Image (cartoon, grey):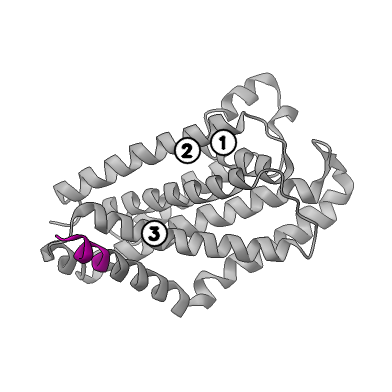
Amino acid sequence: MSPSAILVAFNTIVIREIRRFTRIWAQTLLPPAVTMTLYFIIFGNLIGSRIGTMDGFDYMSFIVPGLIMMAVITSSYANVVSSFFGMKFQHSIEELLVAPVPNWVILAGYVAGGMARGLGVGLIVTLLSLAFTRLQIHNLPAIVLTVFLTSALFSLGGFINAMLATKFDDISIVPTFILTPLTYLGGVFYSIQLLPEFWQGVSMINPILYMVNAFRYGILGVSDVNPWVSVGMILLFIVVLAGVSLRMLQRGKGIRN
């Protein structure tokens, strides 16, 4: 395909994905905003006033970066897994398979669509957080780099889940039993320095810990792990998941049977 044709194919997928989740905004954009507002009220205001400070910051300021990242992660993942599996279920994925569109363009289009929703929800949650605390910016490049890479990573994760899923129940297993526990144990609500040494070591194998702390470093300037090591870990995961996704597309895993 020529570069112009590739661009048209990519833009078509991305525009379709954006229109899909904005058309049903009450199901895709509103629920995360309501959920995070409840987190701000319950954990930040009510419980946070009793906890006091964490790493030198009031508890509300400490948890806001983690909650923003939680919203980005769940929304990026959910958009791709639901959209791609929906196309499989409706058999409209066959239109992409017969079209002369390279696999990497298909993958990039869906990942970009997932990032659009994830970053959009992240922006909404960030604006809502301003009603509860005053955000500061310690390192803007770290903020932008972390949120974009994290959104891309979980969009890839959603794509792999959709490729492997054979029924609608399959697309809820990973978010429920893997993604949610890792997110809650990823340092969103606490510093791992509060944990015993053994559990600090266990926490270090949680990939979401690195994303939350890199983002918290960008906003507050504090982190339980080296922020640039965190960025390196995210990049490594992206390369691995992108390679797996392209390999699965090439083999037609889950879409050619």
Q: Residues within 10 Å of mark 3 (few under 14, many from 20)?
A: many
Magenta part of the chain: 1-9
**Which residue is at a point 63% across and 29% down the rendered structure image?**
225
The mark found on residue 210 in the picture is: 1
User: Which tag is nearer the camera, tag 1 or tag 3?
Assistant: 3
Amino acid type indicated by mark 2: Ile
The mark found on residue 234 in the picture is: 2
Dot 1 falls on a residue whose secondary structure is: helix
Q: Residues within 10 Å of mark 2 (few under 14, many from 20)?
A: many
Dot 2 falls on a residue whose secondary structure is: helix
**Which residue is at a point 60% across and 63% down the rendered structure image?**
123
| Image height of 169 relative to 253, above or below | below
Left or right of residue 68, residue 88 in this image:
left
Residue 4 spot, x, y in % from top left: 22, 65
Q: In the depicted view, which residue is nearer to us: 173 or 203?
A: 203
**Is 43 in the magenta?**
no
